[in-house]
Image: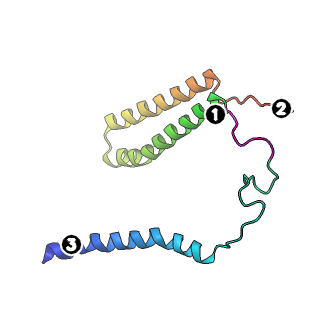
Amino acid sequence: METLIEFSYVVVFAIVATVFTIAPVVISRLIAPRTIGDRTFTTYECGIQPFGSAWTRHSVVYYIYALIFIAFDVDILYLFPAALSYTRQGNVYEFYSLLVFILILVLAIIYAWGKGVFTWKRKSLS
């Protein structure tokens, strides 16, 4: 009986997760306008009239910049709990390993900066 009570928490969690997943879709279907006009299928650009083709080529630097952002974002998410854990235990070895981790991140930023990833070359619209 105790196992069923513990499993009931999982069932309740699954039901709540399903409701929170389906509810926004149902609510948007109920209150969203259903009009189709001339501009329904045009590219939305913040209220500005679209110009040019939507299929443009971006520089490789743009994708490298995005990948670096994702990598450092994940690293920083790891850094906060690691820093909290290291301060509680008071072990010097763990503190130095955290410093080495930060040093590797700084070296990666310096390398990317030296390669010119953070400099943008602007194109003129003509």
Pick whichever, 83 or 25, lies toward us: 25
Q: Position of residue 33 (x, y in %)?
A: 68, 73
Q: Is residue 33 left or right of residue 97?
A: right
- Disc 1/disc 3 C-alpha distance (Å): 49 Å
Do tag 2 and tag 3 residues touch (Cβ < 8 Å)?
no
Give the residue type that dot 2 points to.
Answer: Ser
The mark found on residue 124 in the picture is: 2
Marks 2, 3: nearer the viewer? 2
Pick whichever, 126 or 120, lies toward us: 126
The mark found on residue 6 in the picture is: 3
Q: Which residue is mark 1?
A: 62
Give the residue type that dot 3 points to.
Answer: Glu
Q: Which residues are magenta?
A: 51-58
- Disc 2/disc 3 C-alpha distance (Å): 63 Å
Whether residue 62 appears in magenta in the rendering, the answer is no
Q: In percent of the image, x 12 and y 78: which residue is there?
A: 1
What is the secondary structure assignment of the residue under circle 2?
A: loop
What is the secondary structure assignment of the residue under circle 3?
A: helix
Earlier sequence position, callout 2 versus callout 1:
1
Q: How is the image coloured?
A: rainbow
* Residue 13 higher or lower than 74, as above or below: below
Q: In percent of the image, x 32 and y 34: which residue is there?
A: 93
Q: Position of residue 126 (x, y in %)?
A: 87, 32
* Residue 115 higher or lower than 14, as above or below: above
